[in-house]
Image: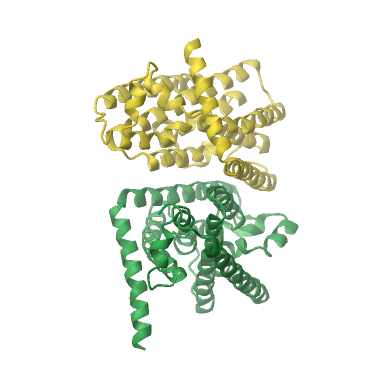
Amino acid sequence: MFSVKRNMGKYLVIAKNSLQEYFTYRLNFILWRVRVVISILISFFLWQTIFRDRSQVFGYSQAQMLTYIILLTLMNGVVLSTRVFRVAEEINLGKLSNILIRPVNYFGYTFARDISDKGINIFFSVIEIMLLVLLLHPPLIVQTQIFFLSLFIFFLIMAAILYFEIGMILSCIGFWSRETWGPQFIFFILVAFLAGTYFPLDILPYPVYNLLQLLPFTYLVYFPLKIYLGTISYQYILRGFLILTFWIFTLWWVLNLLWRKGLKLYTSEGQ
Amino acid sequence: MIRYFRVFILLSYASFQTFLASRIGAVLFLAGKILRFIFFLTFLVVLVAKTQVLAGYNLWQVLLFYLTFNFIDAATQMLFREVYRFRQQIITGNFDLVLVKPVNSLFRALFGGTDLLDLVTLFPFIIFIGIAVSRVADITFIGILLYCLLVLNSLFIAASFHIMVLALAILTTEIDHAVMIYRDLSTMGRLPVDIYSEPLRSFITFVIPIGIMMAFPAKALMGVLSLTGIFTAFGIGITVFSLSLFLWRYALRYYTSASS
């Protein structure tokens, strides 16, 4: 019991230290949040214009669509805000050695940094949502059913784990190449569109949408938000859960394999 | 003028060689940009095909706005890539080496790292714009001429923004996010500015002025831009450019050559 508490304490300290970094680079963080809000505003006004002279588009009401767009701010905080992509740089510059020699699990160390990152982003995203609602007065859907709210939170956590795994796998490229930014850039583009951060994926033609449901991206943003809206069948939720679980276990296995192989090649170059 | 053109070619060639040193990264970066263009294009087609109009514009007109934005954005990124590296020169004091050379320091800071790889995307954009223009009704020769002049005006405004960012780098040594904020704000122009409500629309048209940069050329081509709008666009272009040159000269006086 004491050991578990002590172990948790270590990661808590890591999370705290990581949080303090944000207060050192305040301007950077504020400008990052401004960028998130700009992106949400573009989508918001686009959809608001579309709904100006119609009540339904692609099966969505104005309230459903604008709720989806506004909640993207929260999704950015919970799922997509991460510092895991720094791992590639740490490998390339040999900084990884400084952490490997410490009595911490590296994945736990990175996850603890991510938790602080997500915590501060969630805090600001909630404030931003409140400001957006106050300023824009959009018609919104407030989910009141405990069942959908619980599932929404559950799938948010699953999505955050999935994103962490994908980020770590991409960072592992650093063991084999210095050019890690290119694959990461492509990945960000894929996430931006295939995860549903611009629009709900079910507005796409059915065959494309069907194919996307088999990919992990769908479960990062679109799927949890559909659950929040409550416009999803139990059968579809179960199917989504199975696919998501499959991806989490498969990617965990791939990540461990790559990490083990990568560490064998790692030479701490640059230190 | 010819001397500067030669210097520009020389610097661009050197910049291209650095890209060749990291070929895979450069190709993936380019592929990412193309992918982003295709994804958003698909979204627009799916969306406007369903709704028929967006803020009063039909599909081809919306695509013309989007393609014009992409052309200006790609040309700007291609030409002013060095701006993204300028902060490093300031905080290390390496900008001294630029100042002592017999070349205009602003020219060097703006055009020192032209990304020729972006040319790959520029030519297809011109072809796509040509296709979109041919599908938009009531196009006149005057409209096409105004379109070209206003795109040129947009590039001047974009250059002005980048000059201001350079000046800020000297004054504050913080520009990384300033450039990114400019780029994010400019993405508001990839759709017709008419979708935004007031006062945001006026703000991004006249204050920032993303609307003038990205939307006015397409509007002039479609014949929906008033004469006042055209003169305002050129007036703002000249004002912003003059202001940026003034700011640059002002900032240069505060360069301290720190760390050198």
Image height of A261 relative to B130, above or below: below
Provide residue B250's location: percent of width, then percent of height.
Answer: 27, 24
- Image position, residue A73 (x, y; %): 46, 57
Q: Colour of chain A?
A: green
Location of the C terminus of chain A by quadrant is: bottom left
Where is residue B92 drawn, in percent x and y? 32, 36
Q: Residue at x 70, y 45 (%)?
A: B49
Color style of the picture:
by chain
From where the camera sits, is residue A110 visible? yes
Q: Is residue B115 visible?
A: no
Residue A251 occupies quadrant: bottom right
Drawn side of residue B78 relative to residue A57, left or right: left
Direction bottom: furthest residue = A1
Which residue occupies the foreground of this view, B133 or B24? B24
Q: Colour of chain B?
A: yellow
Please state which of residues B258 and B163 is positioned toward the viewer in this rendering.
B258
Q: Residue at x 37, y 79 (%)?
A: A7
Residue occupying image coordinates x 31% and y 25%: B247
Query: Picture coordinates of residue B145 (x, y %)?
Result: 60, 17
